[in-house]
Each structure stands twice: as structure tokens, then as C-alpha cells.
Image (cartoon, grey):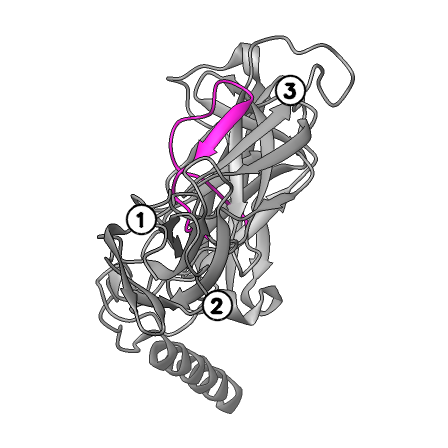
Amino acid sequence: MNRGRNFFLGVLGILFVLAIAGCGRKSVPVPPQTVLPAPIQDLGYVLDERGVTLSWSYPARLENGDKLAGLDSFEILRAVTPAADYCPDCPIRFGEPLTITVDSLPSDATRPGRPVVYSESLLRPGHRYFFTVRSRAGVWQASRDSNVVTFVWEVPPRAPTDLTVIAGDGSLTLVWQPPTALLDGRPLPEDIAYRVYRAGDDGRFAVLPGDPVAGSRFRDDTVQNNKKYSYKVRAIRRLGETVLAGAASQVETGSPRDLTPPAPPRHLMAVVVADGVSLSWEQPGDSDVAGYRIYRSQSTAAAAVLLGEIAAPAVTFLDKQPAAGGPSRFYSVTAFDRAMPANESQPSREAVVEGNSR
């Protein structure tokens, strides 16, 4: 009797424990937009002879607009298919994601809005690639997929050769020899164009905006005189919507310089005074005049001799050693600017001191 009673009480105890364990209060479901990072929307790519470089901005917000506290990693998903089998309307079958932890990134790439980059080099010619990226803030906190980028990979062209930079006034002109083959030695299968890359004092190259250059000559008018610029050029293949850049040329530098001389001085006058011959003139309208050079000759056909040089804004000069008596003296003045080397104007109209005037 007691054994049956004890068994019954034991069963009741087990049922009581199970009942307690199963009656916990359920929490209110958390909306996903309050914990998930906002999807990346600016995934882009660049192709060169090494492969593809993906880039996107480090996320700053959750899906609901709140500030993102932090991230654990990024997931890169890739799909590939033979270019000949591409079906624009077919679903994209991405493979298993490649994970990049935030700790493995450079510190300057982990601030909101800063670019994050990933490069891949093992690409197969004749294939189309698709990439998308997700960010992850925790085990169950992955963002939705980013925009998808796609391109066709082929063998890139070789580098242009003999790049030369020719300095001009407010411009630099680049000329080069085009490549004749792909990196694997095969002839170029189609016409190529070019991208021009420029670096300033910081040494960071960036492609110049605008359409690809059709020929092997390019003029850069977006430069400043007396500033140093570095250039390199890549040939590109245009494969439908894909732009595939080849190997870069050697780097060449150049500095545009001011080649435009000032206007000549105006209304030159020569007056005989007790100490010699006093010259005066009006300055030209140019704002970059650095000074003037004064010349004298014994006739209109004779070579003029430089008497001296004065700095602007002075517009007078005293010739203290004019030839006494004798033939007439012919004076002229030129203006020069601040360029290095300086540009000198044409001579002013001559002022004449008649012979035997002293």
C-alpha cells in the first residue's frame, strides 16, 4: 500500500516540475529592423590586370535608422557561370559566403562611411561573376543582401609603353605607344581605349573623370601651373557593360608652366636731365608683372643693350651713362612675369633721344 502511494506521489512531483518548466512567460517578439544592420547599397567594383576589387561603405545604421553599435563581420557571396550560358532572367545561385571579420580590417576602414575593400584574383576568362555583400552584427543579426554587381572576366591587355608628358601653359599633354597584345600574348581581339590616372602631391592615383580616351594622346587641362603631377595609363577592353583595365604603363611626371608673356609697357618717354636720360612708362594691364628690363641702342637696326632691370611697381629708370653727343639713342622697355623661367614681353615702342642733345 505504501509503495503504491509513494509511486503515485513521485509521478505527481515529476508532472509538477514539468508543468513549471513549460509555463514560462513568452517575451514580445523583437522587430528585425530594430536589430539588423541596414543593407549595404553602394557595392561597387574595379577590374585591373590582377582581378577584381570590391568596395563598399562601412555601415552606420540599423534598418530602422538607429545608430549601429558595432559589427562582427562581412559576408561576401559569389556566383559564377560561363559567359555563354548567362541567363539574365534566371535566379542567381550564390555559393557559401566568405567571411571577413571586422578585426582583420585596417583600423581606418572600420569607421562609419569609410570604404571597405576586398580583392579577388583567381578569376577564369570567359566567365561571368556576380557578387553581393552582407554585414553581420551577431549570430542571428545578418543584414539583407546588398546590391548585386556583375561583370565578365577576360584576359586584360598589356601596358602602354613610352609614356611621355609634355608641359604646356595650364595643361599637360600625354602621348604613348599602344599595346598590341593581351597579357597572355594573344593579339588584341577588339579595339581598345584608355584610362588616364593622375596623382598629385599625396601620390595617390585616381582615374581622371570622363569617357575613355579613344587614341594614344590626351591633354589634361585640369592642372595648375608650376605644380607637379604624376601619370600612368591603362588600356581597357570594353566587353558589353564590363570595362576591363589592363596593366599600367610606367609612371611619368610633369609640371605645367606659364608660357604667356605680359603685354609690353605703354607710352614710353625719354627726357634728358642733368644726371642722364630719365625714362618713364605706363605699366601694362597684366596682374602678374614682376618687373621691367630697359634696353638702349644706337640705331633702329643695331642690337639693343640691356641697361638694367627694375622690380614692379616702379615705372621709371635713369640712364646715368648715356653717350654724350654723338648719334641718337633709342630706348625700349619690356615687362617680365613671375613664371619660372620668366616670360618677357615684346619691346615697347621706342623713345628717341636725338644726337647732340647733351
Between 333 and 24, the residue placed more toward the observer is 333
Q: Amino acid at mark 1?
A: Val
Question: Which dot, 3 or 1, sits closer to the camera?
Answer: 1
Q: Amino acid at mark 2?
A: Thr
Between 319 and 41, the residue placed more toward the observer is 319
Expressed as whole percent of the image width and height from the top left, the position of residue 176 reads 62, 26
Residue matched to label 1: 352
Is residue 287 positioned above or below 126 on the image? below
Q: Residue furthest right?
A: 185
In reply to whether residue 192 is colored magenta, the answer given is no
Say whether residue 162 is visible: yes
Q: Amino acid at mark 3?
A: Pro
Residue matched to label 2: 110
Dominant SS of magenta comes to loop
Q: Secondary structure at mark 2?
A: loop
Q: Residues within 10 Å of mark 3 (few under 14, many from 20)?
A: many
The numbered mark, 2 or 3, whose residue comes first in the sequence reads 2
Is residue 43 positioned above or below 47 on the image? below
Q: Is residue 280 left or right of residue 192?
A: left
Is residue 324 positioned above or below 343 on the image? below
Quarter occupied by residue 274? bottom left
| Range covered by the magenta-colored residues | 205-225
Residue at position x 59%, y 33% from top? 233
